[in-house]
Image (spheres, rainbow, N blue to C red):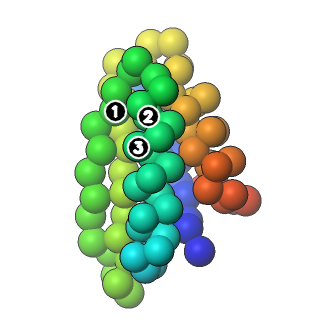
């Protein structure tokens, strides 16, 4: 199961997606690549290891004055069929 966490401050937003296995990793990366490519605004993306063998892919937008990242994050969450985002 892919877990999602969203954080936002003035002109900054971040979506973290945690996944457990190679299948979920491929699904997340393909989704991100496809959706991000459709938009002019490009994020910073990095991956970190977490406990229990999980990895976390983090997508961050800085200087997001018009809050464009919200639509991008919503599309990612819907495409990955995530029901709950903390």
Name the foreground residue: 16 vs 86. 16
Q: Are marks 2 and 3 in contact (CB under 8 Å)?
A: yes
Q: Considering depth in this image, is 17 or 8 the residue closer to the camera?
A: 17
Q: Tell me which residue sits at (32%, 74%) in the image.
A: 50
Residue pictured at 66% horizontal, 59% vertical: 82
- Residue 26's tag is none
Asked whether residue 36 appears in the rendered view, the answer is yes
Disc 2 to disc 1, C-alpha distance: 8 Å
Rendered view: 73 above or below 22: above
| Disc 2, SS | helix
Q: Circle 3 is placed at which residue position?
A: 33
**Which residue has dot 2 on it?**
36
The tag earlier along the polypeptide, 2 or 1, is 2
Residue at numbered disc 1: 43
39 or 54, which lies in front?
39
Q: Find residue 2 and report its horizontal and vertical position in percent.
A: 55, 68
């Amino acid at each position: 199961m892919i877990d999602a966490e969203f954080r936002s401050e003035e002109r900054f937003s971040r979506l973290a997606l945690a996944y457990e296995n190679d299948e979920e990793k491929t699904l997340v990366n393909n989704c991100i690549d496809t959706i991000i490519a459709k938009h002019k605004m490009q994020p910073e993306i990095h991956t970190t290891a977490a406990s229990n063998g999980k990895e976390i892919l983090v997508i961050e937008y800085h200087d997001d004055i018009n809050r464009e990242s919200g639509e991008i994050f919503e599309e990612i969450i819907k495409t990955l069929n995530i029901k709950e985002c903390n």
